[in-house]
Image (tube, helix red, strand yellow):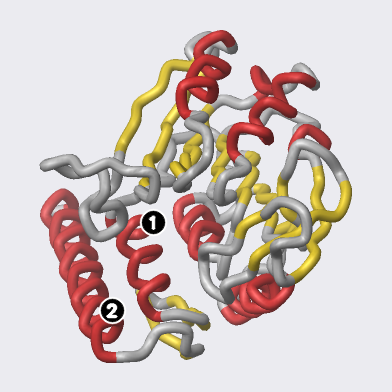
């Protein structure tokens, strides 16, 4: 009886996920991009700046569960780099309501929406840091696109300035899960954490690696750092909607942009 009830609940949740996904996909094709709006998903009220970005985030985070991890703790410590409008935080809180989360988001306008989405959904115990993660603390040029692709840029090529902080400063205890989606700063940030001797304090992580056009290839160095610090890893290149460039038949040139997820887990911890 109980097993059948659980099965029915699971099927109902899957149907709801699929329904939400179809709804967002249709809406993203009908509505113009870069238009703010609100949507109700799985009992959550979400304010967004771009419907296509919301669709991709919901698909990747809630349906495909790219940031899922298992913990025996009721309140795991999670560091969330690149919180955007808060979809990852909302997912973490859906699986671990008592999780201790520190979330970093550098874009001041996106940060306002992040705060609003957490407040609207009655989440008031997340530490929100309006700063970007980088190798050094300071102020850097940032190119804001008002959606999910804002990034730190060299010199004064950006349209705003942002504050940056070191991730190592927030590794004050064992980190159960680290998520990094920081638009090209993933290698410098991991280098900084290693230099301060804190990389082995992280149990699991998911890093979104960004292969930007006309920039040096950094994935090999990133994987080498993880390997020498006791991590084993898996690499996933998303589906064609999120990253079509990595799908065969291959076409690679200097302008190719591609992404992948690096999932890493320490092997010397249970």
Q: Residue at x 34, y 30 (%)?
A: 235
Residue at (45, 80) in percent of width and height: 50
What secondary structure is found at the residue carrying circle 2?
helix
x then y, percent, for residue 75: 61, 43
Which residue is situated farthest in the right direction here? 138
Measuring from the top left, give residue 106's x and y in whole percent.
71, 61
Question: Which residue is at the front of the view, 60 or 191?
Answer: 191
Q: Residue at x 40, y 63 (%)?
A: 57
Q: Quadrant of residue 42?
A: bottom left
Pick whichever, 147 or 7, lies toward us.
Answer: 147
Tag 1, which secondary structure? helix
Q: Position of residue 256 (x, y in %)?
A: 35, 48
Q: Is residue 146 above or below residue 2?
A: below
- From this viewpoint, is residue 170 visible? no
Quadrant where the N terminus lies?
A: bottom left
User: Residues at badges 2 and 1 in contact (C-beta under 8 Å)?
Assistant: no
- Residue 48: where, in percent of width, then height? 50, 80
Measured along the vertical axis of the image, is residue 93 above or below residue 224?
Answer: below
Image side of residue 118 versus residue 58, left or right: right
Residue density around tag 1, few if under 14, some if 14–19, many if 20 or more, within 10 Å: some
- Place residue 109 in its image quadrant: bottom right
Q: Tell me if residue 110 can be seen.
A: yes
Marked residue nearer the N-terminal end (2 or 1)? 2
Name the foreground residue: 207 vs 209: 209
At 47% from the left and 89% from the top, the residue drawn is 35
- Front-most of residues 163 and 122: 163
Q: Which mark is residue 61?
A: 1
User: Which residue position is annotated with label 2?
Assistant: 24
Q: Circle 2: is it few (<14), some (14-19), or many (20+) Cα within 10 Å?
A: many
Q: CA distance from mark 2 to mark 1?
A: 14 Å
């Amino acid at each position: 009886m109980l097993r059948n009830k659980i099965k029915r609940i699971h099927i109902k949740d899957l149907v709801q996920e699929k329904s939400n996904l179809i709804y967002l996909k249709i809406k993203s094709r009908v509505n113009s991009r870069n238009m703010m709006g609100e949507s109700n998903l799985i009992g959550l009220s979400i304010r967004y700046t771009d419907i296509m970005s919301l669709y991709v985030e919901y698909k990747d985070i809630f349906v495909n569960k790219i940031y899922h991890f298992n913990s025996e703790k009721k309140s795991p410590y999670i560091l969330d780099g690149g919180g955007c409008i808060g979809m990852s935080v909302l997912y973490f809180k859906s699986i671990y309501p008592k999780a201790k989360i520190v979330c970093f988001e550098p874009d001041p306008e996106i940060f306002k929406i992040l705060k609003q989405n957490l407040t609207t959904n009655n989440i008031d115990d997340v530490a929100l840091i309006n700063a970007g993660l980088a190798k050094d603390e300071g102020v850097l040029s940032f190119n804001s696109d008002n959606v999910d692709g804002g990034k730190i840029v060299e010199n004064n090529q950006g349209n705003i300035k942002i504050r940056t902080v070191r991730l190592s400063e927030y590794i004050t205890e064992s980190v159960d899960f680290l998520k990094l989606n920081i638009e090209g700063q993933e290698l410098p940030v991991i280098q900084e954490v290693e230099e301060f001797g804190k990389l082995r304090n992280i149990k699991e992580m998911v890093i979104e690696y960004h292969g930007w056009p006309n920039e040096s290839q950094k994935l090999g160095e990133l994987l080498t750092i993880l390997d020498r610090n006791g991590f084993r890893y898996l690499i996933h290149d998303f589906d064609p909607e999120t990253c079509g460039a990595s799908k065969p038949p291959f076409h690679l040139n200097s302008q190719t942009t591609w992404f992948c997820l690096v999932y890493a887990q320490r092997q010397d911890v249970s």
